[in-house]
Amino acid sequence: MAQAATIELAQYIRPGDTVTFGQADAHPRTLLRALAAQRHQIGRTRLFLGIGQGLETILQPEYADAFDYLAYCGSGSNRALAQAGVLDIVTDNYSALPGLLSRGALRVDVVLLQVSPPDEQGRYSLGMAREYLVPALEGARAILAEVCPCVPWTHGGPYLRESDIDLLIQTQDDDPGTDAREPGPIEQAIGRNVASIVPDGATLQTGIGAIPDAVLAALAGHRDLGLHSGSLGEGIIGLAESGALTNARKGVDTGLTIGGVLIGGPRLRRFAHRNPRLALRSTAYTHDARVLAGLNRFTAINSAVEVDLTGQVNSEAAGGAYVGAVGGVVDFLRGAHASKNGVPIIALPSMARGQSRVVASLSGPVTVPRSCSCVIVTEHGIADLRGLTLSQRIDRMLGVAHPEQRDALEREIAAQRPLGWKIR
């Protein structure tokens, strides 16, 4: 096993290569620091980024002198790259990433990994993430990995042996992540509203953050819930401890919580370590339309930047900045539509920074078209738009907007007179 101080990445990474690595709490920070320091020795390379968490000082905008940055999202430390004009955004659905990274336009040459210490059989686990790393590994020429003591050994495969890895280093440069913040009153109200429309026996998909955690907390009194999600956060622990999470009625992967990436602090790592009831899988599985359609009462719970009065959803841009992603929102919402008794949910606060997030016209792109009808939930109520006319949708959406914004929104939509809207 090599020492971090002796890393010479030019042996493995060639000019023109595409390089990717785990996102969020799966960042291989020692390898990334070495990559940044040696970028001129290596030559120009393309980096495919996921959620950037704490990489502001490692992958800086000025390093675009040797890096071409591209990502599927503008969140976290990616935001500084986007604001500096050095980040290209990939707007394909998350379900398309496996093909793009393994053999398509984004084919990866080198994968940088953060792995757990090996088990008794000498198998290194990919720890906090599988998702798009798995297809990237399938087509990669070189695999470089750092072993971190704080990384949990998680089930789900693939598992690597030392002979599978071109460069393996030991690092003490651990970042155990941060614990999630407690949901506030607005998030708790949203969580209660969402929980009121989730039936017992449902299989849930949620994102990460205060709203998903509030939803999971509000579901503690439910029974036989399942989880199948791209990302799993701290909220899954309380749901499991309450007895509500059994995965007994999923219809697929019975008894197992399925995810693509874990995002959270030490408590989540302890929960995941060698947990036989939790498995991480490739994006090719977690976002597969046939798998999602086969899940029992698949309930997809996603957030957004804003939703307009006709049901169009923007989950990408705010205030002229790219801050979100297309990601898996369309994949999961369509999966909920295809699942028997599934529920496609968009949950968001009615206001943010003094601005209404229920709007007459989107300020950013249409990530989810209104043809993919959703149930919109705010702290003020629930607007099920499925099967409604435009006039009915507008009425329902006004009912979940902030009370102080409703009159202005009604005047604005009346002035626009959207096509297909019955004039009253």
Image: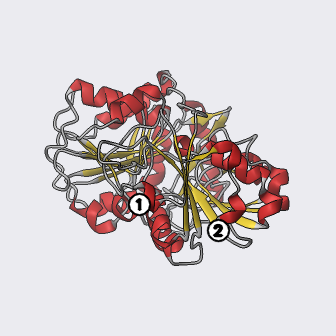
Image height of 353 relative to 32, above or below: above
Residue tagged 1: 283
Which residue is depicted at the point 59% across and 70% down? 109
Q: Label 2, secondary structure: give it.
A: strand
Question: Within 10 Å of the Cα at label 2, are there few (<14), some (14-19), or many (20+) other Cα atoms?
Answer: many
Give the image quarter of residue 108: bottom right
Q: Where does the image place residue 262, in percent across and percent down from the top left?
A: 43, 42
Q: Where does the image place residue 298, in percent across and percent down from the top left?
A: 27, 52
Image height of 304 relative to 181, above or below: below
Residue tagged 2: 18
Question: Within 10 Å of the Cα at label 1, are there few (<14), some (14-19), or many (20+) other Cα atoms?
Answer: many
> Seen in the image, is 305 located left or right of residue 384?
right
Depth order, front residue of 125/418: 125
Name the outermost residue toward the bottom: 104
Which residue is depicted at the point 61% across and 34% down? 173
Which residue is depicted at the point 67% across and 70% down? 17
